[in-house]
Amino acid sequence: MSPSSDLYFAQTLVGDMQNLAYLIGSRAQRKALVVDPAWNVQGLLDQAARDDVEIVGALVTHYHQDHVGGEIFGHRIEGLGRLLELAPMPIHVNKHEAEGLKKVTGVSDSDLVAHEGGDVIELGAIHVRLIHTPGHTPGSQCFLVEERDRAGQLVSGDTLFLDGCGRVDLPGADPRAMYESLETLKALPDDTTLFPGHLYSPEGHDSMGAQKRTNPYLRAANVDMFLGFMGY
């Protein structure tokens, strides 16, 4: 980011499933939010400390274990439970995802801030807008990072990848809801930068304008075409 920007933004490749975690915050306030801290929790805290930034909350895109921790494929991912041991902080989750998150990670109601779509978290001049994007899970959400007079950054979790989108064949998934969520994201300005939840492509980011031209799931002309792409 340019020197005059207040935005602190870091993307980090973590874990065994090509996950991307993020730190988003205000340089002036020296405070940040961590997105999907499932893997290498201490490393994420250390990264923020090296940058002289305090992590003051966690943002959850959705409740799957590779994004929040828990048991998966016979292995334990440390996730939010470990984060709260090391640095207690509020966990921001969509209200439709709260029960699943508690079940998977063991966190309690008192740890959570359950949000509606459209809620905004402010850190200095940085606004993080929570966009409810059901489809991959009922309470999936994306984070639109906004700063006045600057192009936005979209952290999309498993809703939207570079030239792909999240699976809709898992429990709680809904392919029609995914189509509507992608239509919502398509309405964002072309100069918005997309940052996905996994590194499934050579690059870790792209413009929404480019993705509207190349991503077949964003190019679907209608819901029937989209369902055909998804095998329905």
Image (tube, rainbow, N blue to C red):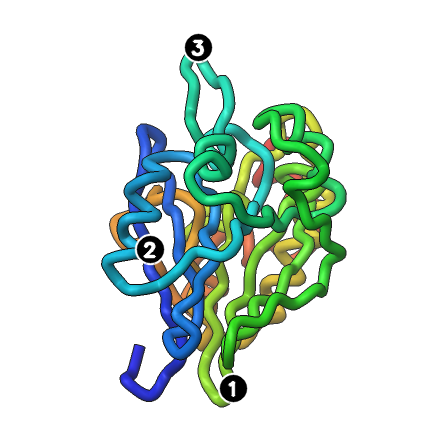
- Tag 1 or tag 2, which sits nearer the N-term? 2
- Tag 1 or tag 3, which sits nearer the N-term? 3
Which residue matches tag 3? Answer: 74
Residue at position x 29%, y 56% in the image: 49
Q: From mark 2 to mark 1, how far is it between C-alphas?
A: 21 Å
Residue at position x 51%, y 69% in the image: 145
Can residue 106 be seen here? The reply is yes
Look at the image and tell me in which quarter the N terminus lies: bottom left
x and y, in percent, of residue 78 in the image: 42, 27
Asked if labels 1 and 3 touch by Cβ distance under 8 angstroms, the answer is no
Q: From mark 3 to mark 2, how far is it between C-alphas?
A: 28 Å
Which residue matches tag 2? Answer: 11
SS at badge 1: loop
| Residue that extends furthest to the top in the rendered view of this protein | 74
SS at badge 2: strand
> As rendered, which of 4 and 231 lies closer to the eye?
4
> As rendered, which of 93 and 47 lies closer to the eye?
47
Q: Residues within 10 Å of mark 1 (few under 14, many from 20)?
A: few
Q: Is residue 80 left or right of residue 135?
A: left
Type of amino acid under label 2:
Gln
